[in-house]
Image: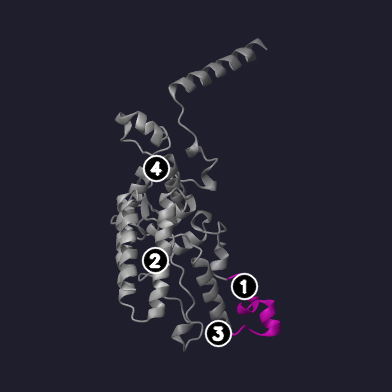
Amino acid sequence: MQTSITSLYRSYLRQIRRLPHHYLRSFFRIKASDDFRSIVGTSNQHVQRVKVKRVSKDVRKIERALNGNAAAFSSILDSAYGRRGKLRWEIMKPILSDPTSPLPEPLIPSKAKSRPPLYTKELQALLTSSIARSTATPVKQEYLKFPPDLSPRADPTSEEARLLGPLSKRLEINKRWRFYTKEWRKVLPPAGVFVKSPDGTVTSDLSQVGIRSVGLQDDVFKGIEEIVGPLETPRPITRRERRLASDRTHRHPSRWLRRRYQELLGRLPTLVYSHDPNRPEKQGNYAVYLSTNALHPDLYNSAIRRPLLDDCNLAWVKQADDLQDKERRNG
């Protein structure tokens, strides 16, 4: 058994070395180290075999991704950038609580565990945005106060409560927590938090407004956008073109790879905090945005996806306008 574990570990490292970017290689080296420490530290043979089987599945997935399987490559990107797995929970955990916000009052005064869930500002923005949801269906704002599957009897002023009596507080607590847990699990963790000033500039410096940072590190998100590149630049050359033009090797070698990262940006929402520095007494609010370079249905027909008008096309547009003006005058 020890020999097969060592062989699997070496195979895992060989596949990791073939990954295209430094961040992916670093992430999976750490993951491989954690996985095999867990395997070696397990004394139960059955549990050890289960862990080995899971790691073997990860190794085969990386191999398929390196051989051009788009679904497998997207899956390892999701693991590395917190769309699934342990890193996803580490990003979401701080968003589910807020030390600066007061806890809700218990529904049963003598039971501290009867407090309803707390919806932090960041979580409210993510839940009510379609681009931050894996199901693409946002939660209505009123559902955060009164879940849709909660009986109207939970409202003591309702007609049902007067006719049938109030709903059990214990049942109400369970319903609220089940809705909360079900919905936050559908949230795509944010890639980071940015600040938008009144003049429209966006910065990652959060110290000026005193809000907390969540998500990935700034350089990780910037690294993805550098791989994808801005839309107005020429498309990256293919490997065949790269072989024919060795002087252009500084450009990205694979359109396929760039497309996978564009799809990843469509699953990486960012939180943007807007505030007015002239009114410090008024709290700012969060909004959810996607990178302008992302591949996402909400961005297909947006103005940011259209190429910039160059001088040649501008001349054609101007000529067409002149012809239309001339026809109007003659008509």
Is residue 298 magenta-colored?
Answer: no
Determine the image quadrant of residue 42: bottom left
Calculate the distance from the C-alpha at mark 2 to the C-alpha at mark 1: 40 Å
- Res 162 → quadrant: bottom right
Q: Which residue is mark 1?
A: 149
For the residues marked 4 and 3, what is the alpha-carbon distance in whole angstroms?
50 Å
- Residue most toward the top? 330
Give the CA distance from mark 3 to mark 1: 15 Å
Residue 64 location in percent, x, y?
A: 44, 53
Q: CA distance from mark 2 to mark 4?
A: 30 Å
Tag 1–tag 4 contact (CB < 8 Å) = no
Q: Would you say 155 lies left or right of 90 here?
A: right
100 above or below 307?
below
Tag 4–tag 3 contact (CB < 8 Å): no
Measuring 31% from the left and 34% from the top, which residue is drawn there? 249
Residue that mark 2 sits on: 55
Reading the image, the residue beneath label 3 is 170
Judging depth in this view, the residue of 110 and 278 nearest the camera is: 110
Rendered view: 259 above or below 326: below
